[in-house]
Image (cartoon, rainbow, N blue to C red):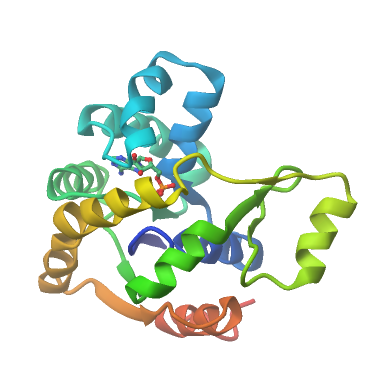
């Protein structure tokens, strides 16, 4: 299946994609993760992307498209993928459409994870990543046992540099101005399915499994 996850920062795209990966062997392609890796390893592309990421702005389409074209040429995505955090504006959506049309593999569905603003703020400020496993956790919402499991195994709870209140405000503004128009774009293409993203991880996941028609499928 070729899926796009649409939703504001903090709507749960990464967490839910990780679940689908674990339960259904799907391949998550997160442009945010790819960019953070490029920044951490100091590649030319990472150096060019860093300032925009630190400010909570969008990285240029040129950089992101170059990265995504390269990623979608790798073998593990030939059977399908979940695009998490891409596309983020209309130019990227159109580029994706023509990229997929060229290989006759159009999108199957676009999932909108719908979450109110007040919940997004708490999710973003509380978000941490376990340094050992990469698992996404939240100091407000994750069960204490999951947080302890990371720390007891010697892991650190990493706080993303752009998950601070100042940058979060800009990221949400950018989402409203640049990315939200994609909801209408995909709705009129007949591809959009909305999943309520406000509940706990399991409840949202059940909604997602139903929307993707995966029940009873592993
Ligand atoms: P994310 O992890 O998806 O929240 O992305 C973190 C940051 O990476 C964003 O705030 C942007 O600066 C950048 N980024 C990720 N995906 C894209 C994209 N598709 N287009 C432009 N910038 C992106």
Quadrant of the image containing the C terminus? bottom right
Quadrant of the image containing the N terminus? bottom left
Quadrant housing residue 60: top left
Q: Is residue 62 left or right of residue 39?
A: left
Q: Nearer the viewer, residue 152 or 75?
A: 152
**Which residue is farthest top?**
44
Q: Is residue 69 left or right of residue 203?
A: left
Identify the residue shown where x is 43% and y is 62%.
10
Quadrant housing residue 8: bottom left
Question: How many marks can you see?
Answer: 0
Identify the residue shown where x is 13% and y is 43%.
91
Let me know if residue 7 appears in the view: yes
Residue 6 % position (x, y): 32, 63
Residue 156 % position (x, y): 75, 44
Identify the residue shown where x is 16% and y is 52%.
178
Q: Nearer the viewer, residue 128 or 76?
A: 128
Q: Is residue 131 left or right of residue 71?
A: right
Residue 210 % position (x, y): 46, 85
**Which residue is farthest front?**
166
Q: Nearer the viewer, residue 10 or 37?
A: 10
Q: Please determine whether, in this image, residue 97 is positioned above or below residue 11.
A: above
Let me know if residue 68 appears in the view: no
Identify the residue shown where x is 23% and y is 41%.
99
Q: Please determine whether, in this image, residue 50 is positioned above or below residue 96.
A: above
Q: Please determine whether, in this image, residue 120 is positioned above or below residue 71.
A: below
Residue 26 % position (x, y): 54, 58
Ligand 1 appears in which quadrant?
top left
């Amino acid at each position: 299946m070729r899926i796009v996850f649409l939703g504001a920062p903090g709507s749960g795209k990464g967490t839910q994609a990780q679940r689908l990966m674990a339960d259904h062997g799907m391949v998550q392609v997160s442009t945010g993760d790819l960019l953070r890796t490029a920044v951490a390893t100091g590649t030319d592309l990472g150096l060019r992307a860093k300032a925009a990421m630190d400010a909570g702005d969008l990285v240029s389409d040129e950089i992101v498209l170059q990265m995504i074209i390269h990623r979608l040429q790798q073998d593990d995505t030939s059977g399908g993928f979940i695009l998490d955090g891409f596309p983020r504006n209309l130019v990227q959506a159109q580029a994706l459409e023509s990229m997929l049309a060229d290989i006759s593999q159009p999108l199957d569905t676009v999932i909108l994870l719908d979450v109110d603003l007040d919940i997004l703020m708490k999710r973003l400020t509380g978000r941490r990543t376990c340094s050992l496993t990469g698992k996404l956790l939240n100091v407000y919402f994750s069960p204490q046992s999951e947080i302890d499991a990371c720390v007891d195994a010697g892991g650190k709870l990493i706080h993303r540099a752009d998950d601070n209140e100042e940058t979060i405000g800009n990221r949400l503004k950018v989402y409203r101005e640049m990315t939200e128009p994609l909801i209408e774009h995909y709705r009129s293409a007949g591809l959009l399915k909305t999943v309520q993203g406000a509940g706990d991880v399991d409840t949202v996941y059940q909604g997602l499994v139903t929307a993707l028609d995966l029940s009873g499928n592993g």
